[in-house]
């Protein structure tokens, strides 16, 4: 009878140790599979895309600027694109951005620079919906590179957090008058 009690005590102890080991393994698995904490700031995301048109070829069409988790404290998102005048004559080019949603029209700012580094546009995404004031002259058969920056200015409120926008860049070309 005493042997039976000893066997029961041993079996109980083994069950307790097994249970404790199982709990430790489960805790280790849960701890290892935990999603890591983020930076703590929820920002805005922007993607700018460009596509060729009849008169203009685009080197590497598609996404030309990508910015994620933009906040007033983050660095600007930068990008650029290169176009080619495929016609036999010089063209005047004006540009604009067409966002897919108005959610970041006031909070997100954009700068567009031309091939010579001149500033063609600097302002809010909402204002970028209008064509640039001054056209850029493109010469036939010459590649021209444009620069882009997008950022959240420091004085904007919290309305940008968690928002995303895709901006399609639009081209308006006219033939230079002879």
Image (cartoon, rainbow, N blue to C red):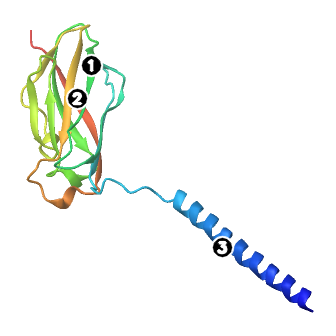
Question: Mark on residue 171?
Answer: 2
Rendered location of residue 64, percent (x, y): 31, 31
Rendered location of residue 66, percent (x, y): 31, 38
**Residue placed furthest toward the front:** 2
Task: Answer whether residue 33 is visible to the viewer in this image.
Answer: no
Number of other residues with Cα within 10 Å of mark 2, as a class: few under 14, some 14 to 19, many 20 or more: some
Can you tell which of label 3 and label 2 is closer to the viewer?
Answer: 3
Number of other residues with Cα within 10 Å of mark 1, as a class: few under 14, some 14 to 19, many 20 or more: many
Q: Residue at x 23, y 55 (%)?
A: 103
Q: Residue at x 54, y 57 (%)?
A: 32
In the displayed structure, 130 sits above or below 95; it is: below
Upstream in sequence: badge 3 or badge 2: 3
* Quarter where residue 162 is shown: bottom left
Question: Mark on residue 20?
Answer: 3
* Quarter where residue 169 is shown: top left
Residue under label 1: 83
Task: Answer whether residue 121 is visible to the viewer in this image.
Answer: yes
Label 3, label 2: how many angstroms apart (C-alpha)?
68 Å
Rendered location of residue 39, percent (x, y): 31, 53
Between 156 and 139, the one lying in front of the other is 156
Can you tell which of label 3 and label 1 is closer to the viewer?
Answer: 3
Q: Are marks 2 and 1 in contact (CB under 8 Å)?
A: yes
Q: Give the secondary structure at mark 3.
A: helix
User: With 21 as the anchor, is 97 left or right in this view?
Assistant: left
Label 2, label 1: how many angstroms apart (C-alpha)?
10 Å
Q: Residue at x 52, y 61 (%)?
A: 31
């Amino acid at each position: 009878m005493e042997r039976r009690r000893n066997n029961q005590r041993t079996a109980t102890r083994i069950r307790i140790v097994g249970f404790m080991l199982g709990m430790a393994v489960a805790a280790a698995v849960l701890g290892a599979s935990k999603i890591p904490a983020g930076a703590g700031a929820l920002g805005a995301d922007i993607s700018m895309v460009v596509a060729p048109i009849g008169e203009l070829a685009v080197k590497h069409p598609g996404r030309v600027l990508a910015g994620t988790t933009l906040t007033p404290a983050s660095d600007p998102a930068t990008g650029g694109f290169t176009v080619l005048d495929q016609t036999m004559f010089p063209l005047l080019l004006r540009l604009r951005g067409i966002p897919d949603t108005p959610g970041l029209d006031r909070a997100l700012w954009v700068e567009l620079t031309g091939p010579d580094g001149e500033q063609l546009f600097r302002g809010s995404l909402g204002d970028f919906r209008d064509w640039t004031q001054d056209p850029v002259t493109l010469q036939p058969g010459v590649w021209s590179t444009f620069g882009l920056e997008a950022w959240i200015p420091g004085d904007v409120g919290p309305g940008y957090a968690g928002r995303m926008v895709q901006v399609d860049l639009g081209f308006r070309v006219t033939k230079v008058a002879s």
